[in-house]
Amino acid sequence: MSNATLDLASLPLETPPILTFPQSIAFALVSGLTIEISCGGLITAASQYFQDGKASQTLVVMTVFNIIAIVYSSIVVWGVLLGADNCILGELLAVVCAQLFFVTFDIFMLMKTYAVSAFDRTVLIGCIGVGIYRVCWGIADAVKSHGAWDADLAICSYIQHPVTGIGYNSADIIVDTYSTVVALAFNWKHLKTSLSQIRKVLIQENLLRSLIILAIDSFSIYAALVWTDQFNILMAYLAQNYMYTRCMNAESVFKTIRKKASSTMHGAKPSNSAPYRSVSKQSSQTHGEGSGQP
């Protein structure tokens, strides 16, 4: 969604910059923070790989996403320097990286959604369906949208195809909504059950991530449709990139929480010892703390 490039955001070097100094600082800061988070995510992923001795599917997706995020954010900054000779190529790279950025995150979200459902087959079919729908719109947008050099204004303009623009934005919302609904459904289903603590953490983290992404996607679409200041729209999309990157790399934090929940669960006394509550107090004293065991 953040590949909706501004007409004035790609001035060549010989043209006076359109950003004021404070705007340039804000632009560079948000882009730099996104790159910094991704670099930190790659370091964390490498540490987890050497610690665990293997690369899980989640770790692979996170690594690919962070690499794409670094390249994409760098291209966004490079877009300020585009001239007549590299306008079309630059905008093509921008739209391709943007679609890869969001599609990779959507794949991650759907993987977590499938895990939240306890690998339910119906949920898997839904994940595959909305995932293919999103990928198709991403390919269509990369083909139909393009850059064009305006010789009169001496700017590199990004020409967003109206149909694919609406299509991939709606596809992102569908993925976000699907993930949120599944997380809500399973969170509600197991709210009053004896669900394991680690499953509760998994459901709650996925629900939180889904709600945050749904909110930032909705905000970005609102900004694009309602706001008129081009710099504010650009910053809204940069903020969206930042939040996507932050939510992706929060997985490392959630993984630590899940490990603590798992340790607590295995270290606690069994809570489902109803069949053994009739054991006499004398037997309990004989077996010590093992009275809850057969």
Image: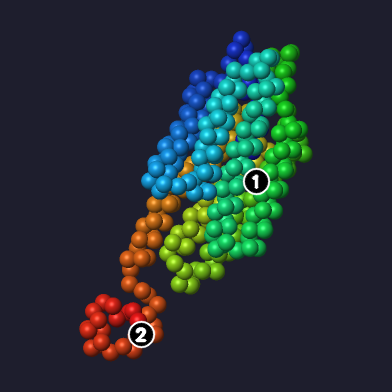
Instruction: Name which quarter of the figure residue 99 lies in.
Output: top right
Q: Pointer 2: what residue?
A: 276
What amino acid type should be assigned to the residue bearing mark 1? Answer: Asp
105 up-or-down from 23: above or below: below
Q: Is residue 8 left or right of residue 19?
A: right
Quadrant that contains the N terminus: top right
Rendering coords of residue 246 (x, y %): 48, 41
Query: For the view shown, which residue lies furthest in the front direction?
Result: 53
Q: Type of residue at label 2?
A: Tyr
Quadrant where the C terminus is found in the figure: bottom left
Secondary structure under the numbered disc 1 in the rendered image = helix
Residue at 50% in and 68% down: 191
Evaluate if marks 1 and 2 touch, with contact meaning CB atoms under 8 Å apart.
no
The answer to whether 181 appears left or right of 190 in the picture is right
Residue under the point 49% across and 49% down: 56
Relative to the observer, which residue lies in front, 8 or 156? Answer: 156
Foreground residue, 233 or 180?
180
Query: Where residue 109 sits: x, y (%)?
Result: 57, 50
The residue at the point 48 percent across, 46 percent down is: 55
Question: Helix or strand or loop: what does disc 2 sit on?
Answer: helix
Instruction: Please report the residue visible at 54 percent of the width from the left and 58 percent of the height from the top.
Output: 115
- Determine the residue located farthest toward the top in the rendered image: 14
| Distance from the alpha carbon under mark 1 to that under mark 2 | 51 Å
Q: How many marks?
A: 2
Q: Is residue 226 above or below residue 186?
A: above
Q: Is residue 165 left or right of residue 11?
A: right
Residue 129 placement (x, y as % from top left): 69, 53
Query: Can you identify the residue that label 1 sits on?
Result: 172
Q: Position of residue 190 (x, y in %)?
A: 51, 69
Q: Quick check: 122 left or right of 66?
A: right
